[in-house]
Image (tube, rainbow, N blue to C red):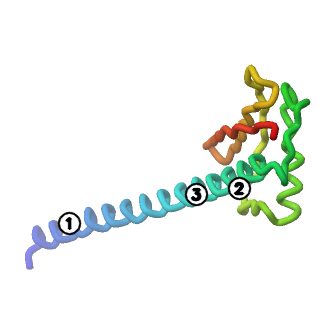
Amino acid sequence: MSLVETVLAVAIMGIAVVTLLGGILTVVTSSQKHRDQSSASALLTSAAEVIADPTLTPFDPAGCGDPVVYDADITASVASGTIVVPAGLTLPTTTVSCTGSPALQVVRIDLAYRSLTWHLDVMKRDL
């Protein structure tokens, strides 16, 4: 085998190795991002179910304009084990806005983690 053939073989192998390592890095990065999104989605869904359930979280008519009216209910649900907070995530916060009807509220649940922010709106009504 000549020197030219050896140099070409090394160059081809180098390109192949760099491409393969780049693909592995992409898979690992995508997997971490997907795990973060899945954990955040599960936490938001659990918080929304707690807020929407009238037995766990009664309707608070004084909640209009109070940004943390339902945060205590989320905290209590975490303490009781109803909501599990994945490692690295913090508790979501709520913001309440009222519609034209005093018996209907829109509860916005916010969760920020790393560089991403998630929002989920839950309609809460007085029974």
Viewed as shown, does residue 124 lie left or right of 19? right
Q: Nearer the viewer, mark 3 or mark 2?
A: 2
Residue found farthest to the front: 127
* Residue carrying label 2: 46
* Residue carrying label 1: 12
Q: Residues within 10 Å of mark 3 (few under 14, many from 20)?
A: few
Residue located 71% across and 36% down the image: 108
Could you say whether the residue bearing mark 2 is in a helix, strand or loop? helix
Could you say whether the residue bearing mark 3 is in a helix, strand or loop? helix
- Residues at marks 3 and 2, CA–CA distance in whole angstroms: 12 Å
- Residues at marks 3 and 1, CA–CA distance in whole angstroms: 39 Å
Viewport quadrant of the C terminus: top right
Which mark sits nearer the N-terminus, 1 or 2?
1
Residue found farthest to the top: 100
Residue located 67% across and 47% down the image: 113
Among the 4 quarters of the image, the one containing residue 60: top right
Q: Residues within 10 Å of mark 1 (few under 14, many from 20)?
A: few
Q: Amino acid at mark 2?
A: Ser
> In the rendered structure, are the residues bearing label 3 and label 1 in contact, judged by CB atoms less than 8 Å apart?
no
Residue located 86% across and 49% down the image: 73
**Residue 106 appears at what percent x and percent y?**
72, 33
Front position in the image: 104 or 50: 104
> In the rendered structure, are the residues bearing label 1 and label 2 in contact, judged by CB atoms less than 8 Å apart?
no
Which mark sits nearer the N-terminus, 3 or 1?
1
* Residue carrying label 3: 38
